[in-house]
Every structure is written in structure tokens, then in C-alpha cells.
Image (cartoon, rainbow, N blue to C red):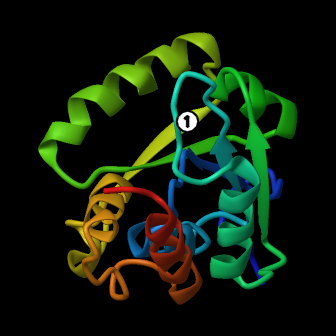
Amino acid sequence: MSSPSGAASGTPLLALYAGSFDPITNGHEDLIKRTLTFADRLIVAVANNMSKQPLFSVDERLAFIHTVTQGDPRIEVRAFTGLLVNFARDVGARVNVRGLRAVSDFEYEFQIALMNRHLHPELETVFMTPSLDTTYISSSMVREVARFGGDVSGLVHPRVAAALVERYAQAPR
């Protein structure tokens, strides 16, 4: 049986899907599952951006991703700091997966992809569109809905929904 990568070299294709995942949503989960249709392995990489104030710690976000991916042996979940291209080079990833929900996402993502190509020409960026039922979901919108007591159960894994309710129950609105 041939690998999903279809690579003539027979080298397994390692893809990278990086983001803040604060929190991981059903849209992220959709892209993770679909990436595994063409990649042999996937690293879901949580960016540890010191300039941002995330709702959940890196360790919490890693735990949520582990829960969502249910221990799939093709998926590795890791945190990283610094340039994505350096992390990709260190782990041997050949593909960088990015999700595009709307045209407005494209301009920003395109600039990043070009810079990444400049810094690491061997890393290909693959843009994926979400499934129709997850197009409107973003982590920031999920946080906002949860912050004001809205129902996020159809937008995130049940464990993440419970954590959002708990976190916002502790914080003033």
C-alpha cells in the first residue's frame, strides 16, 4: 500500500499545523483530520508567543489538543517558540498547513507564506479551506461567546467547552 504522500522518494510526508489554538476548535479539528488524508504524519504545534496574553496556558492547550486528537499515533502535539521555519527545519516537516476561512485571511497568510519561503525554501505552505459547517468558527469568536455565557458546545470539543465555562466563571466580565 502506498503512503498518502505519494512521494516518489518513498519518504513519509511530515506536515506541520501551527497556531495558538486558544482554544482548539472544531474547525482546527477538521483541518487536522483532513491533513492526514495526504500527510503520513502531522505535528500540531502550539505557538508560545510571549507577546500575547492567551486565555489558556500552553500546557492546557497541548492537553486539549491531545484530547481532541484522541491519541492518534500519526499526530504529535508539541509547543514551540520562535520562528516556525526553524521549528519546521528542526523536526523535518516539509509542509506547513494553514487554514483560510475567508478572503480576508488570505492576504495576511500569503505574506507569511512568502516570508517562510524566503527563510526556508524547502517548506511548502498548503492553504486549506474549512468544511462548510466550520467556516465561521474562530478561537477568538469562541472565546467571546463563552465569555458572555453563550453556548459553544457545537464549536469545540466538550472538554474545551467545559474548560471555557469554568475559566469564565472565575473571571469578571
Q: Is residue 6 visible?
A: no
Furthest residue in direction left, as rendered: 103
Quarter residue 74 falls in: bottom right
Which of the two residues, 142 or 68, is positioned nearer the viewer here?
142
- Residue 101: image location, x then y, percent: 24, 55
Is 120 on the left-hand or right-hand side of 22? right
Quarter where residue 121 is shown: top right
| Residue beneath the point at 42% across and 76% down | 26
Q: Which residue is mark 1?
A: 124
Q: Is residue 71 above or below residue 128?
A: below
Q: Position of residue 19 (x, y in %)?
A: 54, 45
Q: Say left or right for 8 vs 24.
A: right
Above-or-below relation of 60 to 150: above
Q: Residue 16 at what x, y percent from top left? A: 65, 48
Badge 1 density bin: few <14, some 14–19, many ≥20, Cα 10 Å: some
Q: Residue at x 36, y 60 (%)?
A: 143
**Camera-side residue: 173 or 87?**
173
